[in-house]
Image: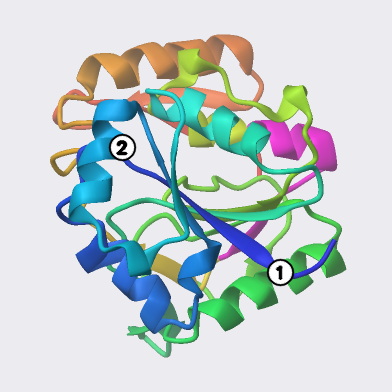
């Protein structure tokens, strides 16, 4: 294993915006386009992306599965065991680092991905993530190694090809929560940079779509039922069903 990484971008209906956001940010941050593979849901999507996304901005476009949970499993199967995979959503405008009481753009993206790998190795962890909320008030200049939520927007992992680490389609929309739990149960913890976060627009057009109420409810109930010692349900003021991790 080495710090040489590949970039996997699961994408759906964002052929017109992925270049301006994630791809531009990665390339400006020192990431070689040859490392980047865009994973789409079907042949129709592939045709759309190949026609709209400049070919010099990525290495390949691969038809995977529809649904983010199934797509994440497909991506893991696509790469060989031992590969260092960095997954990034298709609408990330930038990663941001806590500096004092403010946030600043992470400009050396390549360097951060390599540092994240070295930290995983040092801490005997196999997945890393970033702080899930872009709010410097709650962030800290710490790296945690226990149970924490590893948000699916941007994370990296060493592919071990283990089926028991694959999130269930029943967790669709919250598959990143289940992935966090599965890695915790396998390795005793996950790695999270609590001083790094992301700038993106949640529930924008494309991606998973904007109506997530029923999907969140079903996935939250599945996770609470399967991991009652770790997951608890709560509801936001707008009625959206969410979960908390009880440990870590």
Q: Which residue is mark 1?
A: 4
Q: Is residue 178 visible?
A: yes
- Residue closer to the observer: 117 or 224: 117
Looking at the image, which residue is at 13% across and 40% down?
Answer: 205
Residue 183 is a magenta residue: yes
Is 176 positioned to the left or the right of 230 in the image? left
- Mark 2, residue position: 46
| Percent coordinates x, y for residue 244 in the rendering | 48, 34
Q: Is residue 212 left or right of residue 103?
A: left
Q: Residue at x 50, y 75 (%)?
A: 31
* Front residue of this view, candidates 16 and 91: 16
Left or right placement of residue 74 versus residue 60 in this view: right
Q: CA distance from mark 2 to mark 1?
A: 27 Å
Whether 109 is among the magenta residues is no
- Nearer the observer, 78 or 109: 78
Query: What residue is drawn where x is 15% and y is 52%?
Result: 16
């Amino acid at each position: 294993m080495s710090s040489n990484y590949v970039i996997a971008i699961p994408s759906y209906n964002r052929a017109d915006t992925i270049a301006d956001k994630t791809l531009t940010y990665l390339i400006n941050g020192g990431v070689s386009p040859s490392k980047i593979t865009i994973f789409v849901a079907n042949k129709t999507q592939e045709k759309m992306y190949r026609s709209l996304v400049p070919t010099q901005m990525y290495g390949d476009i691969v038809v995977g599965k529809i649904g983010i949970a199934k797509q994440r499993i497909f991506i893991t199967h696509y790469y060989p065991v031992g590969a260092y995979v960095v997954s990034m959503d298709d609408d990330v405008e930038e990663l941001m680092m806590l500096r004092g009481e403010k946030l600043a753009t992470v400009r050396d993206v390549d360097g951060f991905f390599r540092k994240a790998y070295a930290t995983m190795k040092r801490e005997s962890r196999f997945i890393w993530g970033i702080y899930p909320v872009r709010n410097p008030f709650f962030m800290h200049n710490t790296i945690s190694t226990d149970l924490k939520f590893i948000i699916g927007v941007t994370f990296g992992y060493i592919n071990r090809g283990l089926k028991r680490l694959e999130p269930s389609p029943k967790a669709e929309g919250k598959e990143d929560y289940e992935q966090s739990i599965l890695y915790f149960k396998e390795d005793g913890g996950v790695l999270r940079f609590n001083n790094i976060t992301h700038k993106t627009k949640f529930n924008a057009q494309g991606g998973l779509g904007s109506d997530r109420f029923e999907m969140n409810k079903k996935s939250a109930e599945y996770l609470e039922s399967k991991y009652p010692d770790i997951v608890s349900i709560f509801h936001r003021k707008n009625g959206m069903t969410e979960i908390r991790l009880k440990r870590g």
